[in-house]
Amino acid sequence: MRSPAVILLGGMVATWNHRFVQAARRRGLAVLLVDGPTTGLARLVDQSAAAGPEHPLHGVADCAERRSDEPGDVLEACLAWTRRWDIRGVCNLREDFVEPAALVADLLGLPTPGLRASRVSRNKYLQRCYLAAWSPRSDLVVPAARSARAEEWDRFPAVVKPVGRLASSGVQLVLTPDELCEALAAYAAEEVLQLEERTVGPEFSVESLSRDGQCLYVEVTEKRTTEGDSPYFVELGHTTPAVNLTESARADLLAVHAAVLDRLRFGTGIAHGEYRVTARGRIVLTEVAVRPPGDSILALHWLATGTALEDALIGLAVGEEITPPPPPRRYARQVYLPHRPGTLAGMPVAPRAGLKVTWFDRDGVHDPIEKAGAVADPPAVRCLLALKPLGSRLGPLRESADRAAMFVLDAASPEDLDRLEAQVSRDVHLEVSR
């Protein structure tokens, strides 16, 4: 008799956010992980087996490496597991596994966001085509037409986005035709780009859980980026639930997000939509993703609501009738520390702060956020994490991977959250040498 199991694609995420593995273990499910060949996943799984049931990854039964970008590579590995395991669900954790996860789940007749939602979300051009009603004006720029597109484009400021990259990599603002020509020339010759009219206004993301197209949970996260001081759009902070959003704007934002999911025929799982709200109240779609949000946004929802979305995600993946997380009862925030270019020499903390720095170890297994507070708990710093090892060369902030350190905190009110953030920002800094 085959034992029940769940497949987690992009499984390296589970090595530092073990709430996914814990959720599977509580359901008596073995965990099967798929990721790329450079993650060292197999070694970590071997370590967990040797360490025993106290290890965060205990319960991971097997892992497989993705050997190419072809979806068939992942399909082959997952289908091989069906001979040994009773696969109850497929849960994707990372952007580059969105389409393979949907294909595997669809092939096995398991809950999935849907093939249309998964395909469209993975391509910036398709998003603008399918979701034109909520999108800015945009043009696809293929390599052979860069010069022609630059000459034709007449709406500035504009944003240039590489179609095939992840996160904020390569996304930049251009203000003039000359800047546009210069920017286009800097991308690799074979890279396909998206050119978009710049939308001005604060940025928010909407995280939602759905089952068979019915939204079960939805909340808004407020964002900070480098855009005021830089031509790039690196995210420097997140607050859940959003603070600087009127009730009417929130209602409009949630209505647009619901319409976007309906247009995508979104089925079961999590969606992460990013939007801007203009001064006139128009909601403009930046992009939508059919996978968990990045950074520590999942943890912010946990700290805010007291319920881990990871548990709901595993439940949805295996076809459960889940109990949705409750509305937020605290405010949670992630903040990235600023730095100047140079070599990372340390991360000193003022003695009065009483804070411990955790140094990120790609080969280790740890979740720096250990618990969520109760409703009436005092403001708390939940983690202080250096994202790069000592001696790393730090450059200017041009994409998410350039960020070097962050902290997460929560409080019962936005005012308490602001005060604690200001205190931590005074007590902690990155030491950078030339």
Image: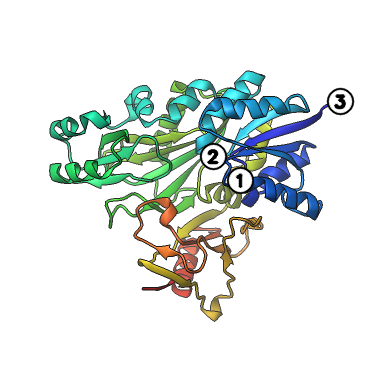
Please name the residue that numbered disc 2 is placed on: 94
- Which element type, helix, strand or loop, lies under badge 3? loop
How many numbered dots are placed on residues in this image?
3
**Earlier residue among tags 3 and 2:** 3
Q: Residue at x 78, y 28 (%)?
A: 84
Amino acid residing under circle 3? Met
**Disc 1 target residue:** 12
> What distance separates the C-alpha of mark 3 from that of mark 2?
31 Å
Residue 187: percent from the left, percent from the top? Answer: 28, 42
* Relative side of 411 to 127, left or right: right
Q: Residues within 10 Å of mark 1 (few under 14, many from 20)?
A: many
Label 2 secondary element: loop
Image quarter (top left, top right, bottom left or bottom right) of the N terminus: top right
User: Which label number is shown at residue 1?
Assistant: 3
| Cα separation between marks 3 and 1 | 29 Å
Q: Indicate the amino acid at tag 1.
A: Met
Is 73 located above or below residue 381 in the figure? above
Front residue of 54 and 345: 345
Where residue 180 appears, as percent x and y from the top left, is 19, 42
Q: Going 46% across and 23% down the picture, which residue do you hit?
A: 264
Q: Earlier in the sequence, mark 2 or mark 1?
A: 1
Along the line of sight, which residue is nearer the eye, 50 or 291? 50
